Amino acid sequence: MAIKDKKEYRRSRIKMRIRKIMSGTAERPRMTVFRSNKEIYVQLIDDLTGRTLATASSQTEEISSQKITKLEQAKLVGKAIAEKASQAGIETVVFDRNGYLYHGRVKSLAEAAREGGLKF
C-alpha cells in the first residue's frame, strides 16, 4: 500500500466514524469543510432533504484576488460562511471537519465562523 493510499484510507475512516453519528437538519445544518492543497471550501447541508443551504470558498473573487496566506484565506472563508448563514436565518450548526485534524486551516476557519456569529 502506497503512502498516499494510507493517508486517504485514514481520513476516510475518520470521516465515516464522524458521519455515522452526525447529521444536519434545516434548523441546525451540518457545516462541512473540504480542504485541497490550494483552496478551502465550506458548505451548510441539510441532510434530511439533501440540500445545500449555503456555500463559501476561497475561490470567490474578493478572497482569491488578495495576496494572503492560506491560513488567512481560511479565516475569510469562515467569516463569509457566517455572514451567509445569518442571511439565511441559521444561527447554530454542527461542525463536520470531514476527517481533517482540527488545526491549521480547519481550526482558523471554525474560529472565524464562531467570531462571525455561528454557534457550534
Image: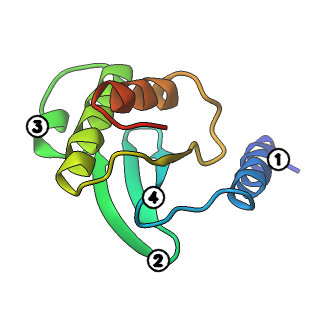
Residue 25 versus residue 10 in the image, above or below: below
Q: CA distance from mark 1 to mark 2?
A: 34 Å
Please state which amino acid type lies under the numbered disc 1.
Answer: Ala
Labels 3, 4: front one = 4
- The answer to whether any part of residue 63 appears in the image is yes
Q: Earlier in the sequence, mark 4 or mark 1?
A: 1
Q: Position of residue 53 (x, y in %)?
A: 32, 64
Q: Is residue 58 visible?
A: no
Report whether 55 appears left or right of 12: left
Q: In the figure, 50 relative to 109: above or below?
A: below
The residue positioned 72% from the left and 47% from the top of the image is 11
Mark 4 or mark 1, whichever is nearer to me: 4
Give the labeled residue for mark 2.
50
Which amino acid does the dot numbered 4 rest on? Pro
Q: Position of residue 94 (x, y in %)?
A: 52, 48
- Compare marks 1 and 3 and give the one earlier in the sequence: 1
Q: Nearer the viewer, residue 50 or 71?
A: 50
Where is residue 3, by image quadrant?
A: top right
For label 2, the SS is loop
- Marked residue nearer the N-terminal end (2 or 4): 4
The residue type indicated by label 2 comes to Gly
Mark 2 to mark 4: distance in Å? 11 Å
Whichever of labels 3 and 2 marks the residue nearer the N terminus, that label is: 2
Closest to the camera, between mark 3 and mark 2, is: 2
Q: Position of residue 77 (x, y in %)?
A: 29, 36
Note whether 26 is above or below 43 in the view shown. below
Residue position marked by numbered label 3 in the rendering: 62
Say which residue label 1 marks: 2
Total count of labels: 4
Q: Is residue 31 left or right of residue 21?
A: left
Q: Secondary structure at mark 4?
A: loop
Residue located beneath label 4 in the image:
29
